[in-house]
Image (tube, rainbow, N blue to C red):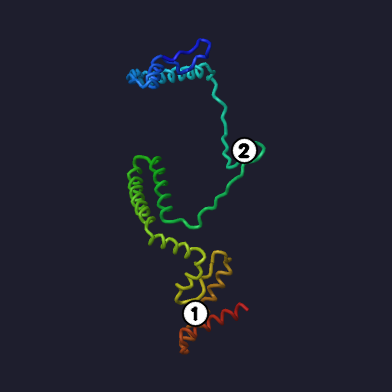
Amino acid sequence: MIKYSKSDDELPHENPEFDSRLECFFNGDPIPPKDAVDFDVGSRIEEFRLRDIEQFEIAMSALDDLDCESPADMITAKFYTCAYDPDEEPVDRIYEAPTMVSRYDKCFARVRALEAQLEKANPNDAPRVAADLKAANAAWDIEKERGLNDRFRKFHLIDGWRSGEGRDGYNTARRTKRSEPNTILQGMSEEERKEHKRALGRNREWKRSKKKAGWSDDQIENGLRERLVLKQA
């Protein structure tokens, strides 16, 4: 058997059974079977669990010792997208509202408005609001399905073009009797509105006289356009 002198430092693997097996290996003798190691995993888990419970109880007792009779000061949280600088003012972010609201957005806004209205409704109005909310949810479900359809997405883009940069051209293409849009009367004074009505009457009389004279529709339209240009000049 391998011996160690007492003057040597004790090795961490010093074990009589290990030394005996090692000596048999080098001598060519049969190596005796290794004794089974009794290692209880469950006891170790229970030990860790009890240790965690003890540490938790210590932390809770420390919190209980604090003076909690007065409420803590309110703290306003600020979030920054860059490194925090206490001397720098937070940057206000301005997000532009969408230029066009889709059908889905309209249905979503209606559902949320009816939900808020239902919470505040009295017993007499609650059934009516609940029915409106049910219909709004049904319409919202339809728009959810349409949002996944390429065909309806294309329709949404077309509507956006018609209400935006293509509005003038689209409205012009829809006119069949005139080439100019209607005059906006909202910004006119009372006297300007009266003069505008008198001018329309004079144009109607001029067109009627040219129609009796045998002019075609194209001739009347071109002549009326020249007449308006001469008046504005």
Toward which corner of the image does residue 90 lie, by quadrant? Answer: top right
Q: Which disc, if any, is residue 25?
A: none
Which quadrant holds the C terminus? Answer: bottom right
70 or 14: which is nearer to us?
14
Q: Which disc, if any, is residue 204?
A: 1
**Residue 94 % position (x, y):** 57, 49
Q: Which disc, if any, is residue 84?
A: 2
Specify whether 32 is left or right of 224: left
Residue at (41, 17) in percent of width and height: 19
Give the SS element for disc 1.
Answer: helix
Q: Amino acid at mark 1?
A: Arg
Q: Amino acid at mark 2?
A: Tyr
- Residue ranking furthest to the top: 6
Circle nearer the viewer, 2 or 1: 2
**Residue 227 % position (x, y):** 56, 82
**Residue 197 % position (x, y):** 53, 73
